[in-house]
Structures are given as C-alpha cells and as structure tokens.
Amino acid sequence: MPMPAREPDSSPPPTRLSAKPGMLSVLATLIVAALVLANMLGVRLGSSSPSSPAPSGAPGTSTAPTPPTPTATPDSARLAELVRVKATDAWVVAAGRVERLLEDDNVTADGSDRHQRFLIKTDDGLTVLISHNIDTSARVPLKVGDRVTLRGEYERTDRGGTIHFTHKPKFPTRQKADDGRPLSGWIEHKGVKYE
C-alpha cells in the first residue's frame, strides 16, 4: 500500500548551535574549576543542611574539654587537594597520628594568644602542623603516636600547611560560614573534645 504524500513543512529548519574549535574544552574546564572551588569552600551541592556544627556556647566562656559529640568525618582527599592546589583559609576535618610534639608558641609576632603546636601525619601520609590556641581552649594531653581527629582552618605555608582555629569562635567576623553562623573548630583525643 503506497504511503500518502506529506505536505511540505513550511517551518524554518532547526537552528544548530555550533561551537568554535576549543570552546567545549574551555567550557568543560570552567565547570570543573567551579566544582573544585565549591568543594574547597565547603559548599555541598544539592544539600540544604549546614556543613559545620553549631557552636555550643559563647566564645571564650570555658576552656574545659567537653564530652564528645558526633563529629564530622575526616576528608583526607579534600585536605590533599587543598595542599596540591596551594589553597588557603579553607575549613577542613582531618585525622591522623601525632608525629612530633613541638614547643608552645608563647611569643608571637602579632601578639596573639599562646598556641600548643604539634605535627600530625594524616591517614593519607600528609604531615601538617597543628596550632591549637591554649588561651581559648584547654591543652590537649598528647603523646607521640596518639590518634586525633580535628576541625579547623587550613592555611598554606612553605612547609606544607598549618591547621589552626581548632577552638570555639574567637574572631566572629573571621570565623563565619557563608550563612553567617560562627564556625567552630575542635580537637578530639581519646574520646574527649577540646574546643
């Protein structure tokens, strides 16, 4: 049986988008860079829940350790990426073993508080300096080989990096999440959280 003849289509032909050579790779690179930047800044795509715990008191009201609460899961891949891209001022959760105990930093160039300092080797093998404010929080009773989990701000240095602000917010204007909530750091050691 023969097919009936179709009437000619009077609509214009569909417009075809054409990209100049290399434009697709530039677009793909920009998308990947935006995703990496969002990850470095702690943005969780597709989630409306906050990514940092709410503080449990006013800054500086207590230096005593607190009982542990459920903590964030360490993200060693994120820390490794921050080190690789030489990022700075990024909040991280890390875990590892105490590699070396250093002298306290009691005389700082900028007149800031005293800091307990130690090196940890993360689960991915990175060595990072931890600078824990002992005027804002209690000293952590550490020994070489002890395991710690901590949350603080990673700051790039020539030697690999430092994690500081491992305490309740002391600088409300600096330690804020994108939504304005204060960011709070901590160190967990042997089931005790030091804030």
Image (cartoon, helix red, strand yellow):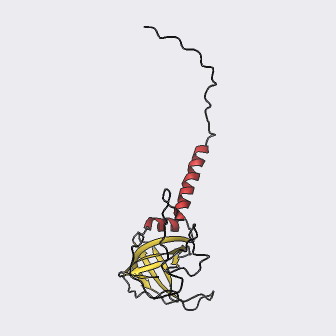
| Horizontal and vertical percent position of residue 152 | 50, 75
Q: Residue at x 60, y 29 (%)?
A: 14
Q: Position of residue 37 (x, y in %)?
A: 56, 61
Is residue 67 or residue 83 the one in the foreground? 67
- Count of marks placed on residues: 0
Q: Residue furthest top?
A: 1
**30 or 67, nearer to the observer:** 67
* Above or below, 16 relative to 79: above
Image x and y of residue 155, in percent = 55, 74
**Drawn side of residue 188 relative to residue 129, left or right:** left
Residue at x 47% of width, y 65% of height:
78
Query: Where is residue 69, by image quadrant?
Result: bottom left
Q: Position of residue 62 (x, y in %)?
A: 49, 88
Residue 108 position (above or below residue 160) = below
Furthest-front residue in this view: 57
Query: Between residues 116 and 185, which one lies in front from this camera angle?
Result: 185
Indicate whether 113 appears above or below 32.
below
Judge left or right: residue 74 versus residue 107. Answer: left
The quadrant of the rendering that contains the N terminus is: top left
The residue sitting at the bottom extreme is 106
